[in-house]
Image (tube, coloured by chain):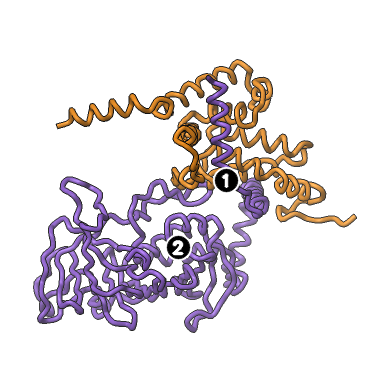
Chain colours: A purple, B orange
Amino acid sequence: MNADLGELLREGIERATAGERLGPGLAGQARQRHHRRALTVRAAAVTSTAAAATAAVLAATIGTGGSPQPGAQTTAYVVGHTERALAAAERGSLIERVTATLPGMIARVGAVAVVVPAPRKVTPSVRKRDTRFLSSLPIVRTTSWSYRGQTRVKGFAPGGRLAIDLGPAAPTRPGGPRPARGIIAVDPNTGKWYHRLHMSPTFGIGRLTCGNQGLDWTAAGGGQLAPAEWTALISKALSCRLFQAAGHQQVGGVDALRLTATPRLLRELHGVAADIGPAVTLWVNPKTFLPVRLVLSPRERADFGWLKPTTANLATLRVTVPAGLHQVRLPAHARLMWAVKSAHSR
Amino acid sequence: MVSRTNRDGSAGGPDTGRLDRLLAERGDHLLHAAIALTENRQDAEDLVQAAVERLLRRRRRVDDLEAYLRRTLYNLAADGWRRQGTWRRRGLLLSSLPGDSAGADAVTTVDLRDALVRALRELPPRQRAVLVLRYWEQLTQAETADLLGCSEGTVKSAASRGLTRLRELTAPWHDPQPHLAQDSARTRETP
C-alpha cells in the first residue's frame, strides 16, 4: 500500500513539475546577492575600527560642501532622499497630484462601483448583481489629488470627457457649514450625484513589511490597488530597497534621476497587478527627490505633481455638485471600489 | 591562461564555468525537487537560489558541486527554510496541470496524484523532504539518511508518518462515496 502511494506521489510530482525550466538568470542573481552579502559582511567587519576615519572623512566632505556628483549618485543616496521627500509630503507638506493613464485594452478600468455586501458580511463581495457603476462612461485616465488621507479623483472617458468626479464634498457656499463626512460622486453625464460613500478596504500597502528578499505581501489584505496607493507602494518599495539607480533622463523638461525596479519587485508586481510591463521605471526630481513619473507598462503611467497646501490648492480636494443634478442616496453600507472590467468580459 | 574576475569580485577561473554548466545540465531537476519541496515555482526558484548562494560562499572547499547543491537544497527545505517575502499563490501549480481525458478511474487516479502533491505541502518540512527523496528521487533509506545527515531510523519514521498523514489528507480520493453520502446526510439534517 505504501509503495502504491509512493508511486502515485512520484507520478504526481512528475506531473506537477513537467515542463518547468530553471530561468537562465538564476546564477547571476545568486552571485549578485552573494556579492551584496559579502560587502555587508566586510563593511560590518571594518566598521568598528574605521569609525574615527569615517568621521574624519565625513567632516572633510561637509567642510568642502561635497555631495555626490550628478551621475555618480548611488542607489542608497537617491532612494534615501526620495524616501524622506515622500515621507515629508505624506506628513502634509505637499498635496500630491497624480495623472494616470490606464491601459486602453481594458474598457472599464477605474470605473467606480458601489458594492453592497451581504448582511453581516465583513468583506464586500464583488458579485455582479451587487455592483453599480457610478460612472456611465468608461474611464481611461484619472487625475487624483491626495492630502492627509483625503483623496479626490476625477475620471475621464476617451476624448477627455469627465466621467466621474468623486471626493469629499465642498461646503454648499464659501465658508459655509462643514459638509457631512464621507465622499460623494458626481456623474455629469447622467445628471446624478451619489452620497454618501465610504472607501472599501484597500490593498493595505501600509501593512506590508520588508522581508529578507523583498516585500512580505502576506500582511496585505485583499482587494485591488487603488490609484492613490501607487505612491504608498513606491515608498514601501524604496524602503525595502527594491529600486536601483539607473542614471539620468529627460522627463517633462526635468533631467530626472532614473530608478528601475529590481527583478524581485517586478516579479512581485506581476503577481498582484495585471498589465505590468517587463520594466517598471520611476523618475524623481534631482532637486526635490519627489517622483516625477512612474511607468508601469508601455500603456500605463502616472505623472506626479506636488502642490503647496495653499487655500486655493486645498479647494481642489473637494467636489462641488453642479446645480440641477439629481441626488441618489446610497445604502449606508455601500463601499467604493475600483472595478476592473476587461473588454472581453463586457 | 587568462585570469577572470567574477561579479563577486573573486577570481573566477573554473568555478564560474562549472557552476553555470551544472545549472544548465541539472538546474531543471533541482528546480523540480524545489517545487515539490515548496509551495510554488516562485518559492522553488528562491530555494534553488539560496542553495546556489551557499555554494558560492563555500565553493573553494567544495569538490562535487552537484552533490553539495543537492544536499544544501534538501537540508534547507528540511530545516524549514521558506522564502521570507513569499507570495501566497496556492493552487497555481495544480490548476495549471494538464487535464486527463481518460475514463473515470483514470480521472480518479489523476485526482489522487494531484491531491497527494497538494497534501505533501501540508507536511512538516522534514517529512516532506524525506518523502521527496525516497519516492521521487528514489533513494534508499541509507542514502536519504546520509544526504539529510540523520539516522536511518529517523528517515524510516519520518517516511512512515508522512505517508500516514498523506493517506489521511487524501482520504476522500481513496474512498469518495462514503464521504459524499455523509455530506449529503449532514446537509439534509441542516434546517
Up/down of A175 relative to A31, above or below: below
Task: Report helix, strand or loop for mark 2.
Answer: helix
Give the number of the disc on residue A18.
none
Judging depth in this view, the residue of A73 and A210 nearest the camera is A210
Residue at mark 1: B46
| Residue at 29 percent of width and 27 percent of height | B181
Q: Position of residue B158 (x, y in %)?
A: 54, 21
| Callout 1 crowding tier (Cα within 10 Å): few <14, some 14–19, many ≥20 | many
Against A174, is A123 above or below?
above
* Mark 2 crowdedness (10 Å alpha carbons): few <14, some 14-19, many ≥20: some
Label 2, on which residue? Answer: A83
Give the percent coordinates (x, y) of residue B179: 33, 26
User: What's the CA distance linking mark 2 and mark 1?
Assistant: 28 Å
Q: Position of residue A4 (x, y in %)?
A: 55, 24
Residue occupying the point 46% across, 73% down = A299
Residue A9: image quadrant is top right
* Amino acid type, callout 2: Glu
The C terminus of chain A sits in image quarter:
bottom left
Query: Can residue A50 be spotted in the picture?
Result: no
- Kind of residue indicated by mark 1: Asp
Which mark's residue is nearer the viewer, 2 or 1?
1
Q: Secondary structure at mark 1?
A: helix
Of residues A240 and A5, the one nearer the viewer is A5
Q: Residue at x 23, y 73 (%)?
A: A136
Residue at the (23%, 27%) spot, across then down: B185
Q: Chain of mark 2?
A: A
B86 sits to left or right of A245: left
Dot 2 and dot 1 within a common chain: no
